[in-house]
Image: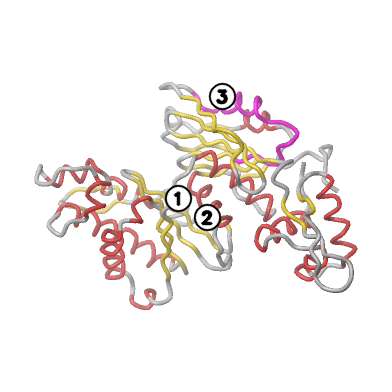
Amino acid sequence: MHLTQSQSNLLYLLHRHGPRSRQQLSELTGWRPNTVGDVTSTMIEVGLVCEGEPVAMGPGRPSVPLHIDGNRRCVLGVAVRPGRVEACRMNLLGQRLGDAITLRTREGQNPVAQVEQLVRQMIDPEIVAFGLSVTGLLDSEQQTILYSFAVPGKSALSIEPIIHAAGEVPMVFDNDMHALASRWLLTHDVDEDEDLLIVHLRDGAIGAALLIDGQPNRGSVVGGNELGNTYLPVDDQRYRLEQVFSSNTLEQWSNGSKPGRLEQRLRLCADDDVALAKVVDLLALGLANSVNLIRPGCLVIASEYACYSRFISRLMTSVESYTLGPLIDRMRTELWTNSAAEPAEDAGYLALAHLYQNRSWGAVTRPSPQAEVAR
C-alpha cells in the first residue's frame, strides 16, 4: 500500500496532536470538511485510522474522534548488526507486536541473504512499510552498503535481493543512527524546524546523526557515524573518538591504578580517577568540535550513561569550555537515558517516519504503478 500525501499528513497530525475529530482536522489542515471526510473514510477502510467513542462537545451532534489504528496494520523493522540480524513487527503506534526474531550470522556469511529470507517469511498484506537499518556507511541512492562491520570483506554490497523480497511494500533503507533519530522524533515533543545533533554513547561505540528540518543531513561530518571515527592526537598517537571512550583504552591508561570497566567508573566518576577524567575530557573535545562546526539548536546525549549525574556534569562542563562562546547560550542539551531498544524497533521507526511524514528517510522503494494505491 502506498499512502497519498493527504493520508500521510493526517496520520502525522493524529500522531502529533492525538485523537481529533474530522472538524478539528479540517481546522488544522485548512482543508474543506468534505475533503477531510473523503480522505479519512478511505483511511478507516484500509485500517490506518479508527473511530473512537462519540464525545459531547455541547449542543448538536457528538464529536467522533479519530485515532491511529493500532490493531489492523503494522510495519516491519529489520536491523543488520555485527554477528546478527534482528526483525520485528510494530503497530502504527510504535508498539512491538510479539517477540523480536534474531538470526546469528556466522563469520564470513552474507547477511543480505539472511535478511532476504527473513523478509520473504515476514512480509504479509498487513504490513504497510518496511524499514531496514545497517551499521556503517551506506549509499542510499544506489541502495548499497559501502562499509559495515556487519558485512564481511571490504567490497560494497547491494541490497537489491532484499528490495525484491519486499515486493510492493514501500521500503526505507538507512543507517542505525538515522533509525535511532527517527525514534527520537516520533517519541518526543520536538520542534522539527530546529537543527538537532543526536549522539549515542556506548562502550567503544559512538554514533551521531544531524537532523535539519526533521530530516537527516547526509553530507555532514557527523551525519552517519563519522563522529566516532574522527581521530584525536593523544600522547603522540592517534585515537578514534570511540576508541578513547572504551573500557580497553581506559584500562590501558589506568596502568592498573583503578580497576573496573567504563560503565562502573562512569557511575562513580571519582575525583581521583585521572584516566577517566582524561577520557571524559577528550570525549567533550570531540563533541564540542562537532557543535562548533554545525551549530545545532539542540544536542541530545543518548546513552544509558546519561543517568549518571556526576559524569554528565563533568562532561557538559568540559563541552562548554571547548565550545565557542556565542554558541553556548543558543544551544540546549537534552538527555535520553532510555534510548536503548531492540535495533529492529529503531528500524521500524524508519518506516513509521516515512508513513507519518511521507518524506524520504534513506532510499524509499515505491510501489510500481500497478500496485495497490490507497485512494
Q: Compare marks 1 and 3 and give the one earlier in the sequence.
A: 3
Magenta-drawn stretch contains 121: yes
Q: Which element type, helix, strand or loop, lies under badge 1?
A: loop
The location of residue 296, given as percent across then percent down, is: 46, 67
Give the quarter of the figure containing the N terminus: top right
Tell me which corner region of the image, top left, top right, bottom left or bottom right, holds residue 118: top right
Task: Give the spatial CA distance, label 1 vs label 3.
Answer: 29 Å
**Could you tell me which residue is drawn at 15 percent across and 47 percent down?**
253
- Amino acid type at mark 2: Trp
Looking at the picture, which amino acid does disc 3 mark?
Ala
- Camera-nearest label, 2 or 3: 2
Label ID, residue 339? 1
How dense is the environment of label 1, judged by Cα within 10 Å: few (below 14), some, or many (20 and up)? some
- In front here: 353 or 154? 353
First to last magenta residue range? 110-131
Q: Which residue lies at the image location 65% right of the left edge and 43% below the top edge?
A: 91
The residue that mark 3 highlights is 113
First reached walking from the N terminus: tag 2 or tag 3: 3
Could you tell whether 195 is left or right of 353 in the image?
Answer: left
**Which residue has dot 2 on it?**
184
